[in-house]
Structures are given as C-alpha cells and as structure tokens.
Amino acid sequence: MNNNLNDLSLSNTLMRPKPERSSHDVTIYNQIFDAILSQRLLPGTKLTEEELAKIFKVSRTIVRRALLRLSQDCIVDIKPNRGASVACPTVKQAREIIQARRIIEAEIIREVVTVIDQDQIYALRQLVDEEKKNVEHHIRSSGIRLSGDFHLELAKVSKNTTLTKFIRELIPQTSLVIARYEKPGYDNCSHAEHYELIDIIARGDAQSAVLLMDKHLLRIEEKLDLSEHNVQVDLKTLFCEVG
C-alpha cells in the first residue's frame, strides 16, 4: 500500500482541483480519484461520508466537499437518500464520451495549429516526457491523468474557451471510462502518439494533425472491453495505511 501511495504523489497534474478551500478535501479528492484510475476502487463502490471521515481523520464536511467535487467531474454519483458511489458509466455513455471528444478535439487541433508558439510546443513536450516516465514506471493512475492533461493543454492553447470547457468536463469522464473498461494486457502508449502529434503541429500541418487526433481517440475506444461488471470494495481495507 505504501508504494501505491508514494506513486500517487507523482500525480501533481493539471486535472487536479486547485486548493480553493482546504488542502484536506483536495487530498481526499486525489486519493479517491487515483484509487479509481488504478482500478483499486471500482465503479459502483459506495463512498460513505462517515467511513471516509474516520479513514482520513477529517470532518464529514471536508469529505462532503471532496465528494461534491468528484460529483461535479462525473467521477462520483450522489443520489438523495442513497449517498455517494463511484460512477459507473454505461457502455452507451462510454461510446458517447469518446464520440464527443472526436468531434470537439478535431476543431481544437485545427485552431491549435494556427496559434501555437515555440514555448507552448516545448511545454507540451515536457508534459509528454512526464507522461512517458510514469508509464515506464507502471504508475497507471498518473499515466492516465497526464494523458488527459495533454489534451487539456491543447485545448487551452487553442484559446477557444467554450471547447476548452467541454473538454475539461469530458477528460475526467474519459479517465473513468478507461479505468473501467480497458482490456487487460494493453500497454499505455498514448505518449508515443502525443509526441507524433506535437511534431505534426510544429510543422503546421492541420489536416494531418486532425487525422492523427481522430485515430488516437479511436484507438482509445478499441482498447475498451465494453461489457458491464460490478465488484464491491471495502473502503477501510483499501485506505488502511492512510494517515
């Protein structure tokens, strides 16, 4: 468990919420999200405020804030009188999320090619370097997060605030879908395609960049086993060494 927690500390990525209110709820957000991305906490698992408050040694108010943030990112479902549980996207929802990204990111990449500068290209390469490093060290949750961060940064470069807002909402949902449905045995090699995409963008080839982005997102869907299953996890055991 200690190794897993140490791995999580490397995931200081752009997808993480800024500590607007309390570092405690940010920590809980990250711990839960990373447990989901690393498949230690599976869809459908109930997340009770009282149990999490005891595990993390914080108030239920802090836990509630973390769960609300996760709910806003569609990572956790909160239902009246039933509490919170890890979201369980359906096969249909998984396909819709990928399809929405294919449509939106095609336009984003067209705009990126016209506005990107050398400093932004360098920053993107650094981000992919970090993604590659985490993948090579088999840190699954960090690799997935950093892959999402790359796409979010591209959206920011485009300066299209509306499309960036859509992608900011879709990326955590995509991460959940990958964690939920990715077939066993697949290596996370998205960083190789990210490097290739940066090279094409740097050449100013918008058409090739759009085609590669679409193929890249289609490959994500090809790696998914879109069949349903549910397993319950004991929260106390999962986070037994926290604190």
Image (tube, grey):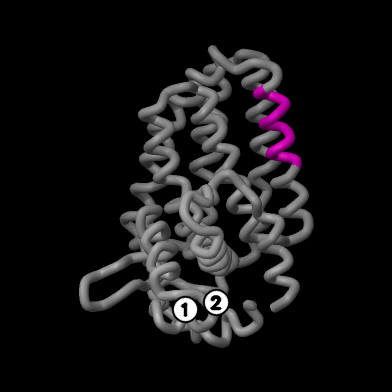
In this view, the residue in front, 227 or 107, is 107
Given contact means CB atoms under 8 Å apart, are the residues at marks 1 and 2 in contact?
yes
Q: Amino acid at mark 1?
A: Ala
Lateral position of residue 55 relative to residue 200, left or right: left
Distance CA(mark 1)–CA(mark 2): 5 Å
Residue 182 makes an appearance in the image: no
Q: Residue at position x 58%, y 42% from top?
A: 149
Image location (x, y in percent) of residue 38: 59, 66
Q: Main secondary structure of the magenta part?
A: helix
- The C terminus is located in which quarter? bottom right
Residue 122 makes an appearance in the image: yes
The quadrant where residue 165 appears: top left
Q: Residue at position x 54%, y 64% from top?
A: 24
Q: Which secondary structure lies at badge 2?
A: helix
The image shows residue 125, relative to residue 47, as above or below, that is above
Q: Residue at position x 38%, y 68% from top?
A: 64
Residue identifier under label 2: 56
Residue identifier under label 1: 53
- Residue 187: within the magenta? no
- Residue 124: within the magenta? yes
Q: Amino acid at mark 2?
A: Phe
- The N terminus is located in which quarter? bottom right
Image location (x, y in percent) of residue 239: 58, 80
The image shows residue 225, relative to residue 189, as above or below, that is below
Q: Which secondary structure lies at badge 1?
A: helix
Numbered range of the magenta stretch: 120-129
The image shows residue 117, relative to residue 123, as above or below, that is above
In this view, the residue in front, 88 or 206, is 88
The quadrant where residue 206 appears: top right
In this view, the residue in front, 230 or 221, is 230
